[in-house]
Amino acid sequence: MTSLTLVRRIAARPSIVFDALTTPDGIAGWWGPDDGPVLAAETDVRVGGHFRVRFRMLDGREHESTGEYTEVAKPTRLAMTWRWTEGGEAQEAGEESRVEIDLRPIDTGTELTFTHSRLQTEVSRDSHKKGWIGALDKLERQFANDGPQRALM
């Protein structure tokens, strides 16, 4: 098994970033590797609660992932299981991996550390890395476009 870790600086305080990670409206603004739409987002943000997100990529392919929240410590940490129910990497079919997100306040907003572990192969890791980079790019742009004053208030 293998993993990936990405670090980003987001121009918003941790509680605002946490809400973008956990609310259906927030997820709709950044989930997915390209500018395709989020078709459905459901969250029950508590330990033992579940999430489901379905999105369409610009090439028309649809993907859906689900999981269970295993740690919820607003506004600093979120951990969950991850499983593809449609689309995704063939190597991950029927497998469960883990996503962990740590949020740390910094002068300009939040340092986000994103780790996706328990991936089955390096090919799958590289594919997930590309997808998460695209999604986190959108999250970062979303708050850069909001302007630092509003997001840090």
Image (spheres, grey):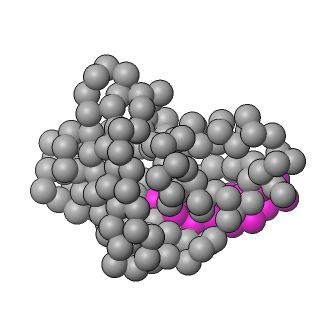
**Residue 140 lies in the magenta-colored region:** no
Q: Is residue 3 visible?
A: no
Quarter holding the N terminus? bottom left
Give whichever of 65, 115 is nearer the camera: 65
Q: Position of residue 88 (x, y in %)?
A: 24, 42
Quarter holding the C terminus? bottom right
How many numbered dots are placed on residues in this image? 0
Q: Residue at x 41, y 28 (%)?
A: 36
Q: Is residue 49 visible?
A: yes
Q: Residue at x 82, y 48 (%)?
A: 150
- Indicate whether 139 appears above or below 68: above
Q: Position of residue 104 (x, y in %)?
A: 69, 66
**Would residue 124 appear left or right of 23 to someone viewing this image?**
left
Q: Residue at x 81, y 55 (%)?
A: 152
Task: Indicate the quadrant where residue 137 lies.
Answer: top right
Q: Position of residue 9 (x, y in %)?
A: 69, 50
**Residue 108 lies in the magenta-colored region:** yes
- Indicate whether 57 appears above or below 10: above
**Would residue 149 appear left or right of 41 to someone viewing this image?**
right
Give whichever of 60, 137 is nearer the camera: 60
**Would residue 71 appear left or right of 61 to someone viewing this image?**
right
**Would residue 98 appear left or right of 113 to someone viewing this image?**
left
Q: Residue at x 47, y 27 (%)?
A: 35
Q: Position of residue 83 (x, y in %)?
A: 24, 57
Task: Indicate the quadrant where residue 102 lies.
Answer: bottom right
Q: Main secondary structure of the magenta part?
A: strand
Q: Which residues lie in the magenta part?
A: 101-115
For the view shown, which residue lies furthest in the top direction?
59
